[in-house]
Image (cartoon, coloured by chain):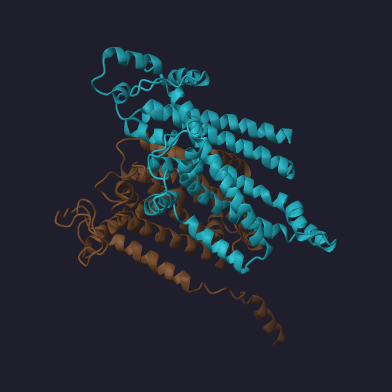
Chain colours: A brown, B cyan
Amino acid sequence: MSNETAVSQVDKPEKRDPLGPLFWVCVGWATLTILASLLANWLPIESPITQDYTALNQGPTLHHLLGTDDLGRDILARIIFGGRISIGVGFGAMAIGFGIGAPLGMLTAYRRGRLDTIVTSVMYMLLAFPAIIATIAILSFWVPRALPKIIVVIGLASVPLVYRVIRTATLNVAAKDYVVAAKVQGASDRRILLKELLPNIFPIAISFLLIGIATVISLEGALAFLGLSVNPPTPSWGNMINEARTVLSTDPWLVIFPSLALCLFLLCLNFIGDRLRSYFDVTEVKL
Amino acid sequence: MLKYLTRRFITLIIIVFVISVGSFYLIHLLPGNPETVILGIGATPLARAQLAAQLGLNKPIWMQYFIWANHMIHGHFGESFISQTSVSSVILRTLPIDLELIVLSQIIAYAAAIPAAMRAARKPNGWLDRIFSAGSFVLLSIPPFIIIVLLVLLVAIKFNIPHTGPSSYVSFSADWITNLESLALPAFTLAITSFTVYFRTLRSDMIATLQEEYITMARSKGLSRRRIFWRHAFRPSSVALLGASGINIGGLLAGGFVVQYLLAIPGMGYTLIAAINQSDFLLVQGIVFVVSVGVVLINFFFDFIINIVDPRISRE
């Protein structure tokens, strides 16, 4: 009896910090932004490219909640539709980065040996390459620019980074006793990778995924700001800010609203990622 | 240490080679015939022949690479067919502006981040640490292109401070005071982005270092906190900071492009974006090559410094 209580005390997981209300506010806002951009076609908003010449350069009014731009287009509609580009690039590029980098990182960290040495040194070499400059260079030559190309270029550029994070995380888990025990029991490699390693690196992967999406969205914003992303009139948060920079002194809201949408979304993603990481008590991956 | 540096140097050469192949191949990413894309449809046969000779377009592609690489090694980056000037002269003219911007921003970033991180590490989770950490977290989520737009909106337009708005750049040799004024907002923008990274890195490293046994030992000897912080804990904690600075350079350059673009500062970034919009592909290629190699060299330099600060690294 006394023995049993001792065991149950040991088995009881440590009490974790609650995630806190701010975490759920961020989850709510991020979900709202994503849902709005997904369902943009069915929302009761105007088309983002409809021009209303009776309402040019208006500040926020009841009819146009966030005002209109110099062509009379509704800013709220443009922000919601613009989110599609930014969020699409963020998720798409990270899907490519994780699709290639994560399985490769897990596999090499588990197998080790020569394959690991070769792949890891190639990846670390690629990390030394200035990825932002390469992205700008490739996008400026690979004309005409289109969304799939942007996603592919940023996605491939993120592979070495994802690889490094996932490999380091897998290395830490692979040395644990329960993995060794599973191996001794004769579990297949596939079983160890999917049932033992994957669930344990999942928290790190998720938090890094969110922060990665935020980074990519910020990068796409900078590219769009420089005019290297999707072409107008298709709105994206970055090119809305770019178009509005010439009328900064007269119509500041044209810059402020899309900036706010972008920053709030990035802040939420970063905060969720950061909280999840400390929630699962994952020590920061050292360089 | 020598062995470590030799190994790093070999890697460096391989990376520069890969960059050169990549930059060379950019021209071939263009759809269609390179001569037509670079010169336009209305080009004279003479100009087309000149370009073909310059790039070796009628030879096999690996030969073209060696011709190009040979030109690059000798500093011949080609002629821009739009502005009729040599690419290397454009780069030499614009590069100092980028360097000035980066140096200014780094001075501001270090001057703010190091004292802030040391102060915050003194009492982890104290009120000062919380404010700094929350502030840097929020700033980390604001991309530089938004920071600069908002700063211009506030400082140049709302408060109407002279020489800070778009197109107010004056060269350093013409009037250095106005030059610094016109670079104040861009430098500050880049500094904010660097500050968030440097502060977070140094803070967490300092907190970890302060828990080491030799710090407890120093404390029990009765050394002053100032001495323990700056003489005993700062050096081992600054390794990751230096690493972050090296990695940050690529982002700084890209951030520099953005601020130059908004404020029409005629640096390399502004020139690059203008060249992209004018389809001046040889100029784009030259700038991309110089910038990429520059970033890799700076990273190598930081590696070297890190080794001097913490010789244990090369022994691993």
Query: In this orientation, which residue lies closer to the viewer: A270 or B268?
Result: B268
Q: Residue A99: x and y, percent?
A: 45, 50
Q: Residue furthest bottom?
A: A1
Q: Residue A41: x and y, percent?
A: 23, 60
Query: In this orientation, which residue lies closer to the viewer: B278 or A20?
Result: B278
Q: Residue B268: x and y, percent?
A: 44, 33
Q: Is residue A94 visible?
A: no
Q: Residue furthest right?
A: B221
Task: Give left or right: position of A92 versus B6.
Answer: left
The image quadrant that residue A263 belongs to is: bottom left
The image quadrant that residue B222 belongs to is: bottom right
Q: Quadrant of the N terminus of chain B?
A: top right
Query: In this orientation, which residue lies closer to the viewer: B25 or A182?
Result: B25
Query: Number of labelled discs?
Result: 0
Q: Quadrant of the C terminus of chain B?
A: top right
Q: Is residue B263 visible?
A: yes
Q: Residue B289: x and y, percent?
A: 48, 30
Task: Give left or right: position of B141 versus A253.
Answer: right
- Residue A97, compared with residue B296, is above or below; it is below
x 30%, y 60%: residue: A38
x 48%, y 34%: residue: B175
Q: Residue furthest left?
A: A54
x 38%, y 14%: residue: B53
x 65%, y 80%: residue: A8
